[in-house]
Image (tube, rainbow, N blue to C red):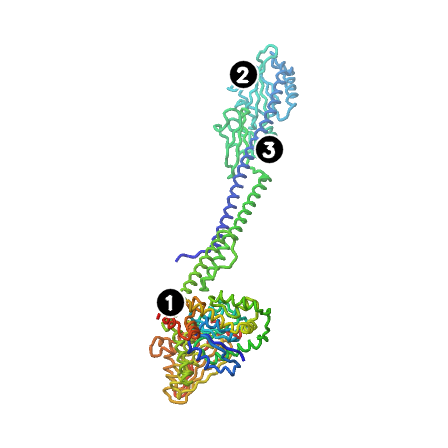
Amino acid sequence: MKEKRSLKKDTLVLFIILLLFFCLVFALAAYIVGDNASRDYRIRTAETAVQNVERTIYTNLVNYNYLTRLLMVDESIVTYLKADEITQDMLYEARKGIYSIQNLYSYIDSVFVFRLDGQSASTERSPYYIDEHGEEYERIMAARGSTIVAINGNGMIHKATGETMMTLSRAIYDINSQKLLGFLIMNVASSYFDSSLTNEMEEEICVVDNMGTLLCGDASLSELYNPNKLPDDEGLITNEVQINGKNKILAASNALEPFTIMCASGKSPRVLSVQLIVALVLTLAAFLCAIFVWGYYVSTNIVSPIHKLRTAMETTKSSGWLSPIETEMPGNEVGMLAENYNSLIEYLNEMFARQIENEKSIQKAEMRVLQEQIKPHFLYNTLETISYLAIEEHAPNVHDALESLGSFYRNFLSKGDREIPLRIEIRIIQDYLALQKLRYGEAFDAEYDVDPDTLECIIPKLILQPLVENAIYHGVRPKGEGEKIRITTKREAEYLLIQVYDSGVGMDEAQIQAVLSDQSYGDEKSFGLAGTIHRIRYFCNSQDVVTIRSEIGEYSEVEIRIPMSWETNEGVPNV
Amino acid sequence: MYRVMIIDDEVSARRLLQQAIDWEALSMELAGEAASGIEAINIIDEVRPDIIFVDINMPFMNGIEFTKLATNRYPDLMIIILTAYDDFEYARQCIRLPVVDYMLKPFVRTDMVELLKRVKAHLDETKPTKQENGSEVTVSAIEQIKNYLRENYTDSEINLTSVAQHFGFSASYLSRKFKQETGKSFVEFLMECRMEKAVELAKTNAKMFCTAADVGIPDPNYFGRLFKKYKGISYSEYVASLHE
């Protein structure tokens, strides 16, 4: 069996699923937008940091370069370089000259000025190892006076402490004669770089040379140095990297030879932009509102009406009556559905009513045919003619009999009605008993105890006559003479009570049961009594309306209780 | 004493009603009877009934037609329709006749007595002392009426009351004056007009029922009786005698 599902429940579940789906999509959208924003932000911060450091270093290099130029033209140094013979004074003057220039700017660790003969004047305060004839020397000379920036002079110079130095080296020429005089090496302490990074402490940042040697900053970052991943022409490159399990953006620049500046930014923007959040929240709110409105609409216009419709149909079904739905319905398709259902019900009811009407008219027609066969007015006119003859012949009892007979037949036929007032039924019995008394005059006397209130009650036609007939033929006649037949009608609380009593031979229990059981209905012998009881039960739509009391040899009494509402004195039956 | 008239084509029915009821006890008397509606129209002014029993099923003019005519001319008349048909109730509703009751045949005496008591009570209540009013009947008016009758006797529904109403006289006053002026009653005069014409038609060898209809008495039985009374011999004998 297919599981029955409730539309209402389904709609609710669907509603919740939709709600969750919308929330999920919203969260995803927020994440994507936020992620992009934070990526952009990281790139921007990393690039900015790199550029800032680069700018600082560049500015400083320009300054250092300026100092080297000052050194080149310093009189004491030029004198020292040009002298054929070096005096202690000269050396001293040269050193003094170097000092005075060196002190113009910070972080300069030492300056070496070499003469072409290999002698030098320097301001070193700790020992240096210098290889003054290596490859680097050739490069300095080849540069023909331009400044070469390198780390530790590309291996030409080492501080004994092992401290990394930035070296600016250049050849010195005579200003006037353009004759080569020597060269100089300016060592700048790497702590100078640290000072250039101080402003950028929020990011992990480092400066390395083209060998990957760390000059300053984050050591772990320097390990990521990859010469193959540097920009071709001096510019910026960004990569996504993982540092300590965190996604970061690495920006690297080698615009300043020989340095490479790297910066990794894992920073998220402090907050998503307020407008963005407001927009997203508003969108979500709008979505929720839309869902609620839609849900409400569906609920009030479709789900609830359909539920009501179903309940109403269920009620109709269980009531067993084809009553139309009276629940108020909206004017949409569901309402139309209810209307269509109602018109179907109406159509069915009409059809049933027509069917019943047909049935009735067929029965009426049949009764009419029967009456036509009897030709009652011929009978009545003839009875009247015979009555006149009886009077002419001075036979009043014949006239009486004829009158009873005429009256009996008229009421017996009753225009073919199936239900008649009790008054008419009593009249039938009176005429019937008057006629029967002509035949069995000695056998019984008739008594009537009729409540006037009951006379207009509508009862099925000919329910008493068969009882009275039964009383005569099976009650008083077998017994003999002077018996009694009594008809009693009473108005009781909710019943019309009718009793037919005879002081005849009575019935035993088996006979009573046989008559009262519906099985004997159709049995020809007891058709009169049993058939009548069947009709009364059918009319009252109840099995419990006929009682028979009897005592063998004493009496029998049939009692009928027809449910009746006594709202008016007319006694309108309400069956 | 209220005057009762019985109209039924069956003599046995008239006799039964006459004898089965103790009229005296109801302070009623049988004032006359008629075997057809046509006859009743002709003699009703002489019988002057208060109550009429009329059978519904009669030839030439049935009980319903008669009742319509009579209630129109005699508004105070109590009419009781006798019928063997149960459905008369419907017929009554259709034609909506005032002051009419009905009794099913064969009647039961107790029912009939009950009905008559009711009718009597109604009459006791409503019947006023009859006031005759209307303009004075002059000699020239009598002449006018005689001419009117000679021209209109073929109308079977004509009678003293209809003529009196037509001319604006009271019926009984006209009846007295008419007899006084002409020496014949109104009914006798109308009858003579019709019989003279009937004699003429008899000479053309016309069949009795045709003659009867032509002279305004479409009930040939009634016409036959009238003709015999007028000529001393029956219509067929008269026609036969003309051909001898």
- Are marks 1 and 3 in one subunit? no
Q: Quadrant of residue B225?
A: bottom left
Q: Badge 1, how many Cα within 10 Å: few under 14, some, many 20+?
A: some
| Between B36 and A316, the one nearer to me in the picture | B36
Q: Badge 2, how many Cα within 10 Å: few under 14, some, many 20+?
A: some
Q: Quadrant of the N terminus of chain B?
A: bottom right
Rendering coords of residue A204 (x, y %): 56, 34
Rendering coords of residue A572 (x, y %): 50, 72
Nearer to us: label 2 or label 3: 3
- The amino acid pointed to by label 1 is Asn
| Between A543 and A553, the one nearer to me in the picture | A553
| Between B45 and A508, the one nearer to me in the picture | B45
Chain letter of mark 3 equals A
Q: Determine the secondary structure under disc 1.
A: loop
Q: Quadrant of residue B173?
A: bottom right
The residue wearing badge 2 is A141
Nearer to us: label 2 or label 1: 1
Q: Determine the secondary structure under disc 3.
A: helix
Question: From the viewer's perspective, is residue A179 above or below residue A251?
Answer: above
- The amino acid pointed to by label 2 is Met
Horizontal placement of A347 versus A73: left or right? left
Q: Badge 3, how many Cα within 10 Å: few under 14, some, many 20+?
A: some
The residue wearing badge 1 is B205
In the image, farthest residue toward the bottom: A481
Chain letter of mark 1 equals B
The residue wearing badge 3 is A200
| Between A31 and A233, the one nearer to me in the picture | A31
Q: Determine the secondary structure under disc 2.
A: helix
